[in-house]
Image (cartoon, grey):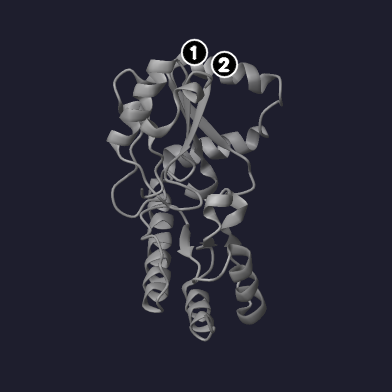
Amino acid sequence: NDFLPDFDTIPENVYSRTKLMFLNYPNNPTSACADFTFFEKALFYAEKYDFVIVQDMAYSEIYFYEPPVSMLEIEGAKKRVIEYYSLSKTYNMTGWRIGFAAGGAELIKGLATVKDNMDSGPFTAIQETAAFALYNCGEESAGIRELYKRRAELFYKGLTGLGYEVLEPRATLYLWIKVPEGYTSMQFSSKLLDEADIVMTPGIGFGDSADSYVRIALTVEEDRINQALDRISKLKK
C-alpha cells in the first residue's frame, strides 16, 4: 500500500482507546509520501474518536517533486493536528537539536507545558541561528534539496539497474531497498559490510514487518555512491 496505513482496517477497540496518533510523512525509513486524501481520512477518524494527530515532518523540505502536503491545510485541522519540523536536514543543523511545532493554540500550549517541565530549551544562540535560517536561507535549503535529489536518482538508477527492487524516492535522504530472496535484513546487511565494506541499516530495526528491507542514507558524495554501486555489482546474491 505504498507504505501507507489503511485506517479503515484499524479495529474500533483500538481507536476508542487512542489519545494520540503518530504519523511521519515524508517517511523515515521508507521515503514514502502521503497525499491530501490520506490525511483527510486520518483526520476523519481523529474527529470521530476524539484524538490528536502528531505528524512528524522532519523531512518536509527534502522533497524531489511536489512539496509534501501539510495536514494543517485541511479545514478545521488545527484543533486536532500538531506538526513537528526539524532544521537538522533542511539547513544542515544535525546535532543542534532544534526544530519547531505548528498547530492550534491549545495544542501548542499543551506542548509548551510539557516541555517547560522537561528542559529549559536549546541554547539561545542556536535558537537565534535557527530563526535566521528560517527567514533568510531559502536558497541554501533549495540547494540541499537538489543535492539529495541527484544522489537519490544516481543510487536508485544504479541499484535498479543491478536488479534490486527499490522504492522510487520522492523525498527524504534515504533509499528503501528490498533484500534479495533468501536473506533477512540482518543477513544482507552483514553481507554488505563483510564483503563490500558498505553499511546499511537492517529493516528489522524498524519492526518485524520491515525485515525484508534495508535502508541506506544518501549522506556521501556522488563518487562514493558510484564506488558503492561498483562494489554491490560484484556481490554474489
Q: Which quarter of the picture shows residue 124? A: top right
Q: Secondary structure at mark 2?
A: helix
Image side of residue 109 versus residue 45, left or right: right
Find out whether the residues at labels 1 and 2 contact each other: C-beta distance under 8 Å. Answer: yes
Q: Residues within 10 Å of mark 1 (few under 14, many from 20)?
A: few
Q: Position of residue 145 (x, y in %)?
A: 40, 55
Q: Which quarter of the picture shows residue 122? A: top right
The residue labelled by disc 2 is 110
Q: Residue at point 42% right, 73% down?
A: 159
Q: Is residue 28 above or below residue 127?
A: below
Q: Position of residue 139 (x, y in %)?
A: 38, 50
Does residue 79 appear in this view? no
Q: Position of residue 175 (x, y in %)?
A: 46, 61
Image side of residue 122 versus residue 141, left or right: right
Q: Is residue 126 above or below residue 11?
A: below
Q: Secondary structure at mark 1?
A: helix
Amino acid type of the residue that numbered disc 1 sits on in the rendered structure: Glu
Rounded to the nearest whole Å, what is the CA distance between mark 1 and mark 2? 6 Å
Image side of residue 34 versus residue 23, left or right: left
Amino acid type of the residue that numbered disc 2 sits on in the rendered structure: Gly
Foreground pick, 64 / 230 = 230
Residue farthest to the top? 106
Q: Residue at point 59% right, 70% down?
A: 188
- Give the label on residue 106, or none: 1
Q: Position of residue 213 (x, y in %)?
A: 51, 61
Q: Please count the marks in the image.
A: 2
Does residue 185 appear in this view? yes
